[in-house]
Amino acid sequence: MWKAIEQSFRGLARQVDFCSLRLVEERSESLEVRLSVPQPLARRLDRGAMVTVVHGGGYGYAATANLSEAGLREAFDTACRWAQISAARSVFDFRTLSLPHPTGRYLGPAADGEADWNRKALYDLLMQESEACRIDERIVDWGVSLGRLDIEQRYLTSEGGDVEQRFRAIIPSLSATAFADGDSQTRSLGGQYNGYCRQGGMEILAQAGLAGAGRRVADEALQLLLAPNCPTGVMDALLMPSQMMLQIHESIGHPLELDRILGDERNYAGTSFVTPDMFGHYQYGSSLLNVSYDPSRSNEFAAYGWDDDGAVAQKAYIIRNGILERPLGGSLSQARAAEAGFALAGVANSRACSWNRAPIDRMANLNVEPGDQSLAQLIGGIERGVLMDTNVSWSIDDSRNKFQFGCEWGQLIENGELKGVVKNPGYRGISATFWRSLKAVGDAGTDDVMGTPFCGKGEPNQVVRVGHASPACVFGNIEVFGGEA
């Protein structure tokens, strides 16, 4: 099939200045046990192609699920018409845009072979952990699931570009809810939004600690039910990786997407407090803050070799020693910024959620680099504060600046020692100053690889996969509050 598609594309592509064809085939499967009842197996196959044309200064694209010669011809003709319409009428002259013609192959971990996906054995494991949640009549809801995702992509260009990429991801999830006396508390494995999503094979189950998690998670839900509310006041906050993931995502990732900085998204998902003139000197965080865009970290959820516009993916620092260095902007956004007078080095993060969406600037693997303190040292350096683990709620304004986040699990820290559990821990701050309060960064031993399958952006909406790795981090003088605040 691929050979016939390539031949059809090569014949069409010679007619325009630039043309690309992005083919995507995505297979997914999900196993679930809810309340110790196995749920029906869910499987999905999605396949199609996006044709992009740049010609005469215009830009056009069209998608099709019909991969026959006639289907590709129709998509190509539609893309050409849009390129003709947009020529000399766009906010950007696409004749100044230089798109690459890459060649190569990228295989993610476990992507080139059969996974050890024994459905009966996996359902048995899920049932085992589901049954383990049933430790008390106050556990009123629980569930455990496991997803598998296999993606194959091919990117062809008019000047001989030919890139093949294959990915496999495993997504385990487990949660339990306790209820008594009008109060309910939920505890989960890595978050209620599939935080332990990674590329790779069945080793991810051990990395996430799925086996044996049922009883522990249910027990922690009961502990939260009996715990007092988190205290309110200004104090230190020790954020564990499962909460750092959300903090990075919302207050670094989204505000640094260059298309948003240039004005896109205002009518849908908001703008950004960051402006193009900040790069190179703005003190985004304390000198301890080092943030990298790293799609080469292969076990993270959004690892890849090339983005969806063919730019090669390489590790780059976004923030170094607290100073803002570069935005999350792909080739098109970099060219738009240059035309506006800002020569900004971006990254290869022009990404689409599927074959029927055009690439836009999206964060991929966005990580806080480890520091030099163990978890014991982080705790030992806190006189009064709260350890917060696993995000449960978030709210942030349209400029991705003022925020308020809540976590599942909290523990008091007094005079350098962990004390009792507290429930409903939350904190608020302002992105433009919050990261400057970073006072200690955990070492590699505190680092964990997290992510989300559900990052939404764009019109029409696109939901993409994102990875975030981070150590535990301590922030000073933070406004902390509990459920009664």
Image: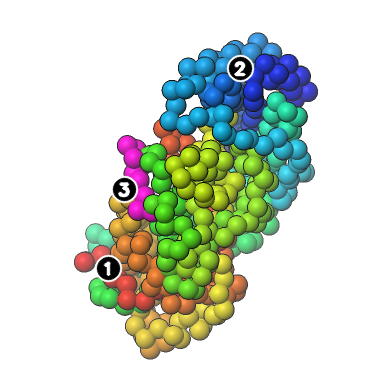
Which quarter of the rendered picture does the C terminus lie within?
A: bottom left
Dominant secondary structure of the magenta stretch?
Answer: loop
Q: Earlier in the sequence, mark 2 or mark 1?
A: 2
For label 2, count other residues whose C-alpha is less than 10 Å away and answer few (under 14), some (14-19) or many (20+): many
Q: Tell me the mark number nearer the camera, choosing from 3 and 1.
A: 3
Residue 218 visible somewhere in the drawing: no
Callout 2 amino acid: Phe
Residue indicated by mark 2: 76
Left or right: 100 in relation to 465: right
Q: Earlier in the sequence, mark 3 or mark 1?
A: 3
Residue indicated by mark 1: 482
Furthest residue in direction front, as rendered = 341
Q: Tell me the mark number nearer the camera, choosing from 2 and 1.
A: 2
Q: Residue at x 53, y 20 (%)?
A: 83
Magenta part of the chain: 266-274
**SS at circle 3:** loop
The disc at residue 398 is 3
Left or right: 52 in relation to 229: right
For label 1, count other residues whose C-alpha is less than 10 Å away and answer few (under 14), some (14-19) or many (20+): many
The span from disc 3 to disc 1 (Cα, nearest Å) is 24 Å
Callout 1 amino acid: Gly
Q: Could you tell me residue 204's position as x and y percent?
A: 64, 56
The span from disc 2 to disc 3 (Cα, nearest Å) is 37 Å
Callout 3 amino acid: Asp
Is 258 one of the magenta-colored residues?
no
**SS at circle 2:** helix
Q: Could you tell me residue 59's position as x and y percent?
A: 53, 25
25 or 55, which is in the foreground?
A: 55
- Please say if 402 is above or below 16: below
443 or 90, which is in the foreground?
A: 90
